[in-house]
Each structure stands twice: as structure tokens, then as C-alpha cells.
Image (cartoon, rainbow, N blue to C red):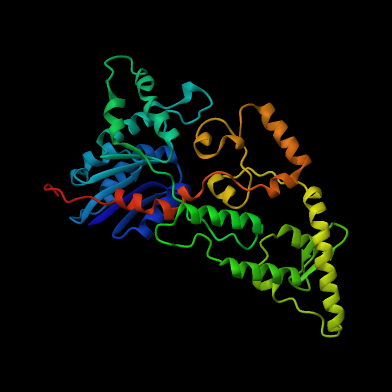
Amino acid sequence: MSTLIIEAFYGGSHKQLVDLLQEEIQDCVLYTLPAKKWHWRARTSALYFSQNVPVSDNYRILFASSVLNLTELTALRPDLGKLKKVLYFHENQLVYPVQKYQERDFQYGYNQILSCLVADVVVFNSAFNMESFLTSIGKFMKLIPDHRPKNLESIIRPKCQVLYFPIRFPDVSRFMPEHKMTHFKKIFDHKGNEDDTPLMPLPFQQKNRVTESLMKNSHLNLESGLCEVQSGPHTTQQDSLSNPLTKVEDLNKTHPSKNSNPGQEEDKQHMSLNLCNILSVTNEQQRPLHIVWPHRWLEAVYCGCYPLCPKDLVYPEIFPAEYLYSTPEQLFKRLQNFCKRPDIIRKHLYKGEMARFSWAALRGKFRSLLTTEPREDL
């Protein structure tokens, strides 16, 4: 049994998903087009793939994103039309933002509706994405002057399901605060990991040893109130501040001076550690708050960021209510308070779920999606 994966826009999250599927799912064959000129990919990629995907009796499943016009492809290649066809929506063209409603090209949304009609399974990366698409079909089709098709939502809906975009969370234990790492580890362990794949490869005992080693090799910068790590003779304060991902192996290269008295070095280390502990509380309040606009929220929160999102679109589906705002005024007020007390953010432990978005949690669902029983006509 073989899975044919076709991606007409091979870049960004589209690339990330199909690369993961090809790596993790057995017997996958991948055909792609570069991630540029999106509009032309949506218009013409079906014809290209119809000519460039070899005919094979081994294909059983066809997986494609909604950029591809699945209707055209299956019409041009009847052999592919016989497969179990899975269509994955990263976004949908019925509600995708445009500057003016008149600028929305009817053809792109229409193509996606047609693709859903010929697909066997239609998968969305969120419930918001699914519902916004399905509930917009009726209004969208009213743009047709006359002889409009009917009941399309009721035909398509039974095929639809939500399957969140899977994330292989990286090992961030090198630079995450210990209390947050411990909290996240408890969350993932509590939710379970179906194949026991470690989400944080660096063991916590090793992490503790690394932290201890880091502190032993740290030098106190009294002017800034920060415990700066010097990884070599050419490391400056600016380098340390601008590179929070200083490699552990570099930290371990730091050794006491050969000409120094061991007893004096030990006293300096103890003094440095004690001063760091004393200043740590003040440090949390004095250090400025960094505000970022992450392209990927699910990953930003995992790396320790505090999410502050609009109470709209997909955000209420992902984040608990305390992380949402309703108006610009609410956003301003919360940011103002956080800037006054950045220690609140640094000490905060995220209260939402992250394990459900991990590849470890979603692997089984994707594998089930990409398997099928042999049919008589295959």
C-alpha cells in the first residue's frame, strides 16, 4: 500500500506537514511545486501534476492540500480518482482576509468547494477553519447570478473532520527557566505520550547539571545586575545578552586562570552565586519585558512565551480565556501592566494544553487517515 502526497505549494507549514508525513508514514511518495506564485499554483498545478505523476498500481491514498484543484486532477487522471482522496485545509479561500470584498477572486473558493465534493475525506487544521468554510458556502454561492447549486454544505459536512497541525516540539531545555521546564514536562507526562517519544530530549538530571555548571562558570556584571556567562576570552557583555542560546559545551570550556589561587577562585564563585541569588528577585522586576509577534503561536508558548491573543478567529479554540482580549483598549491595558511588572510574566506557568498539538499525540490519527482497506476497483 502506498500513499501519494501532492503539494502544490511546497513551503512554510505546507512543506513542514508533508515532510513530516513522508518521514513518519511508510510507503509515501511526494510530488511538489515550489512555494511561489500561489495564484498560479491554484489555477494550473492540477494539469502539471497530471502530466508528471507517474502511473502506478501501488497507490492507494492521495493526500493533497486545498491549493490543488482536486477536481481537475482526478478528471485528467481517472486512475488517481479511484484512490481514497484526502484533502487538507491549512486555510480556506471563502473567508481568507482581503482588503476589499470585491477583490476576492471567486474562482479560488469555488475550486476548493469542488475539491471537497470529489474528496473522500476533508481535513481542517482547526474547528474554526472548518466551520468558517462550511457556513460560508451558502453565502458564497449566492454570488452566482442564477441557477445556483443547492445543499452543498450538507453534502460536504459529513466528510469533514478536524486534525490539528502536528508539531515536533524541539528541545528547548538549554535556555528555558527551570520552573517552566518542570511545568511543561508535567503537562506532557500527564497527557501521555503514546509511543514514549521524549518531547524534551535533554534529561532533567542532565539539565540540572548543566545549570549548575553554567552558574559555576558565570561572572557577575554588577552594572547591569545580570549574571553574565562568558564562554571564552573574546565574549563581551553584548554578546552574552544577544545570544541567549549560548552552547552548553562552550560554557564548559571556561576554566579558572592557571595563576589564580584555588581558594580565591572558590571564594569568588561562592560570592558570585550568592550575589546572583540576592539580585535575582530585583532582576526579574528590572529587566525589560520583551514583546514578540511570533509567526507560530503553538511553538512560542512552548518556548516560554505568554500568549496574548484576540478573542476571535481560532484563538479561543486554542488558548484559555485568561490569555484573550476583546478590544484594543484591553490589549493596551494588559501590556501596560505587564511592562510595569515583567516578573509576573516570567514567573507565570501556562495553564492551557500543548500536548494535543504534538506529533506524538497526533501520529495515530494521521496514520489512520492515511490507511485504507483495499477496494475492488483498485
153 displayed left or right of 168? left
67 displayed left or right of 256? left
Q: Quadrant of residue 129 in the image?
A: top left
Identified at 73% across, 58% down, the residue is 242
Q: Check the picture and name the quadrant holding the N terminus.
A: bottom left
Above or below 117: residue 215: below
Q: How many marks?
A: 0
Identified at 70% across, 70% down, the residue is 212
Identified at 40% across, 51% down, the residue is 362
Q: Quadrant of residue 277 in the image?
A: bottom right
Q: Picture coordinates of residue 61 (x, y %)?
A: 25, 49
Q: Residue furthest top?
A: 146
Q: Residue furthest left?
A: 376
Q: Picture coordinates of residue 196 (x, y %)?
A: 43, 62
Q: Picture coordinates of residue 375 (x, y %)?
A: 15, 48
Above or below 69: residue 145: above
200 displayed left or right of 213? left
Who is closer to the viewer here, 29 or 282?
A: 282
Q: Quadrant of residue 185 in the image?
A: bottom right
Q: Picture coordinates of residue 63 (x, y %)?
A: 31, 47
137 displayed left or right of 378? right
Identified at 49% across, 53% down, the residue is 190
Above or below 228: residue 37: above
